[in-house]
Image (tube, grey):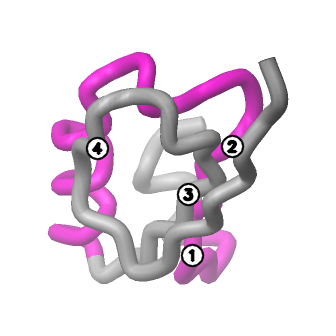
Amino acid sequence: MKLSQMSKKNSDTVVVTGGEPLMWDMSPITKLLKDNNIRTHIETSGAYKFSGIWDWICLSSKKK
């Protein structure tokens, strides 16, 4: 989905989860979202280096 399509649906928050999102640099996508006044939430295990601009962080640690 393109950012312009999200705005048309009146979305004001994006939640990033699944697998482990911080395996990648989240800075580019969160900057784009924040530049468009969209709140950013993330669920992470906390096992990887923190990146991105987040309004809300859920730490969901996992057993090895």
Q: Callout 2: 10 Å neighbours few (<14), some, many (20+)?
A: some
Q: List x then y, in percent, for residue 11.
A: 61, 76
Q: Nearer the viewer, mark 1 or mark 4?
A: 4
Residues at marks 4 and 2 touching, judged by CB atoms closer than 8 Å: no
Residues at marks 3 and 2 touching, judged by CB atoms closer than 8 Å: yes
Give the vertical position of 10 relative to 31 (above or below): below
Q: Earlier in the sequence, mark 3 or mark 2?
A: 2
Q: Earlier in the sequence, mark 4 or mark 3?
A: 3
Give the vertical position of 3 relative to 22 (above or below): below
Calculate the distance from the C-alpha at mark 3 to the C-alpha at mark 1: 11 Å
Element on which disc 2 rests: loop
Residues at marks 2 and 1 touching, judged by CB atoms closer than 8 Å: no
Q: Which residue is mark 2?
A: 17
The amino acid beneath tag 1 is Thr
Q: Callout 1: 10 Å neighbours few (<14), some, many (20+)?
A: some
Q: Which residue is mark 3?
A: 42
Element on which disc 1 rests: strand
Q: Nearer the viewer, mark 4 or mark 2?
A: 4
The amino acid beneath tag 2 is Thr
Residue nearer the viewer, 28 or 2: 28
Q: Earlier in the sequence, mark 3 or mark 1?
A: 1
Residue nearer the viewer, 62 or 57: 62
- 40 sits left or right of 35 in the view: right
Q: Which residue is mark 1?
A: 13
Image: magenta residue range: 8-36
How many marks the image carries: the answer is: 4
Calculate the distance from the C-alpha at mark 1 to the C-alpha at mark 4: 20 Å
Residue nearer the viewer, 26 or 64: 64
Q: Quadrant of the C terminus?
A: top right
For residue 15: magenta? yes
Give the vertical position of 39 relative to 62 (above or below): below
Q: Which residue is mark 4?
A: 50
